[in-house]
């Protein structure tokens, strides 16, 4: 069962509630009884977004995923986004109720038109690297 890291972000509506709702939905996807790690929440400025975009609330979670297909998990995360009110928008990085990005899927490397793993811009995004390092520290502490 692969460990999966997901980045969550929200910059529309009640950001805290949006992130909490996404985490609750993702708990349902995680294998029961397996560790589910959450980083703290980070209030961050928009990066590579349209002008005057609101600030984001971001976090990273890590879970055990019972499947072996990253594209299947991508479909699940996109369904969760729609369920929580994300609307299609032709403007790249437009403000959104919720955004769920698949960062890693175990040790799988994938270059598919719908998904690249590991996420190609992890290192460019402090709003991902900082909470991801929190998760790594917690995971290491659980092993010790």
Image (cartoon, rainbow, N blue to C red):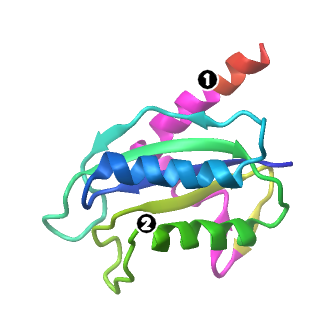
Q: CA distance from mark 2 to mark 1?
A: 30 Å
Residue lying at the far bottom of the rendered structure: 90
The circle drawn on residue 71 is none
Which mark's residue is nearer the viewer, 2 or 1? 2
Q: Is residue 78 above or below residue 68?
A: below
Q: Which x, y percent locates residue 51?
A: 15, 68
Image-quadrant location for residue 73: bottom right
Which of the two residues, 104 or 72, is positioned nearer the viewer here? Answer: 72
Q: Is residue 121 one of those drawn in magenta?
A: yes
* Nearer the observer, 35 or 143: 35
Which mark sits nearer the N-terminus, 2 or 1? 2
Give the residue drawn at x 78%, y 49%.
106
Residue 48 visible somewhere in the drawing: yes
Q: Is residue 92 left or right of residue 115?
A: left
Residue drawn 55% across and 72% down? 78
**Is residue 28 highlighted in magenta?**
no
Residue receiving disc 1: 137
Quadrant the C terminus occupies = top right
Category of crowding for the residue at label 1, using alpha-carbon neighbours closer than 10 angstroms: few (below 14), some (14–19), many (at least 20): few
Give the quarter of the image for residue 102: bottom right
Percent x, y of residue 32:
77, 42
Q: Is residue 69 left or right of residue 47?
A: right
Magenta region, residue range: 112-137
- Mark on residue 84? 2
- The location of residue 42, given as percent across then percent down, is 35, 38
Residue sitting at x 54%, y 60%: 101
């Amino acid at each position: 069962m692969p460990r999966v890291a997901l980045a969550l972000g929200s910059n529309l509506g009640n950001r805290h509630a949006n992130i909490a709702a996404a985490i609750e939905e993702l708990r349902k996807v995680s294998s029961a009884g397996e560790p589910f790690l959450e980083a703290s929440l980070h209030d961050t400025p928009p990066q590579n977004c349209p002008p005057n975009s609101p600030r984001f609330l971001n976090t990273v979670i890590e879970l055990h995923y019972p499947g072996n297909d990253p594209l299947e998990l991508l479909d699940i995360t996109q369904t969760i986004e729609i369920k929580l009110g994300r609307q299609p928008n032709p403007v790249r990085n437009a403000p959104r109720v919720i955004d769920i990005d698949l960062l890693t899927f175990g040790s799988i490397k994938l270059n598919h038109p719908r998904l690249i793993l590991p996420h190609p811009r992890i290192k460019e995004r402090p709003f991902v690297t900082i909470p991801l390092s929190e998760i790594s520290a917690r995971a290491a502490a659980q092993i010790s």
